[in-house]
Image: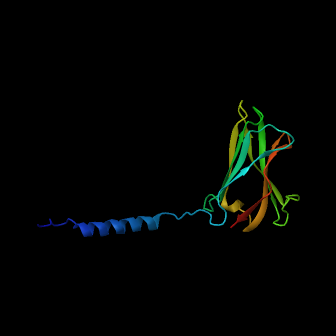
Amino acid sequence: MRVASGLLRPRGLVAALAVGVLSLSALAPVASADQTFHTARIPLLPVNGAPLQSGAVVDVHANGPVIYAQERYLLVGAAPDTTYQVQIAAYLPSDTACTTPLEVIPEATLTTNPAGNGEAGFTFAPSQAPPAGILNLQWTVLAGGAVVYETACTPVALD
């Protein structure tokens, strides 16, 4: 059997495809998940009897060149048609009870629907990332300046 001039034999075709795939992958930006801190779903708990069926902060660390971390805030069965302010407070590793914040960052505004459900998010750019290490963090959700939901004091490894 003769092979027409200019056509690749099967082995040559496989080699050419392999080289092409490797060439394209070398051009693609590298992104990888955080190897120190894995995605966490941290429950939000009601304070002083505030209504809540469930709530959580979902904390995702991408450590990418554009997005350092993303957070999502979820409330189900909270007070209906209410606007909340979500904030995060950072504490020293030794402050395991989260009593004296180093910094408090307002992150997002969350408004619930008539059923009391709502969600919001916040994205940290790499320039907003704190220094590497372990911090204790606590997220709070405020209405009218008063804390109505909060997470436990949570150690988070940053790299």
Which residue is depicted at the point 81% across and 66% down? 93
> In this view of the protein, which residue sits in the foreground, 63 or 39?
39
Vertical placement of residue 70 versus 19, above or below: above
Colouring scheme applied when the structure was drawn: rainbow
Q: Which quadrant: the C terminus? A: bottom right
Which residue is depicted at the point 72% across and 47% down? 56
Q: Which quadrant: the N terminus? A: bottom left
The picture quadrant where one finds residue 96 is bottom right
Which residue is depicted at the point 77% across and 39% down? 52
Q: Position of residue 77 (x, y in %)?
A: 73, 36
Vertical placement of residue 39 versus 55, above or below: below
Residue at the top extreme, as displayed = 114
Q: Position of residue 9 (x, y in %)?
A: 21, 67
> In this view of the protein, which residue sits in the foreground, 99 or 120?
99
Which residue is depicted at the point 71% across and 60% down? 128
Q: Position of residue 60 (x, y in %)?
A: 65, 56
Marks counted in the figure total 0
The picture quadrant where one finds residue 91 is bottom right
> In this view of the protein, which residue sits in the foreground, 86 or 66?
86
Residue 23 left/right relative to 40: left
Q: Position of residue 101 (x, y in %)?
A: 85, 58
The picture quadrant where one finds residue 85 is top right
Residue 27 left/right relative to 156: left
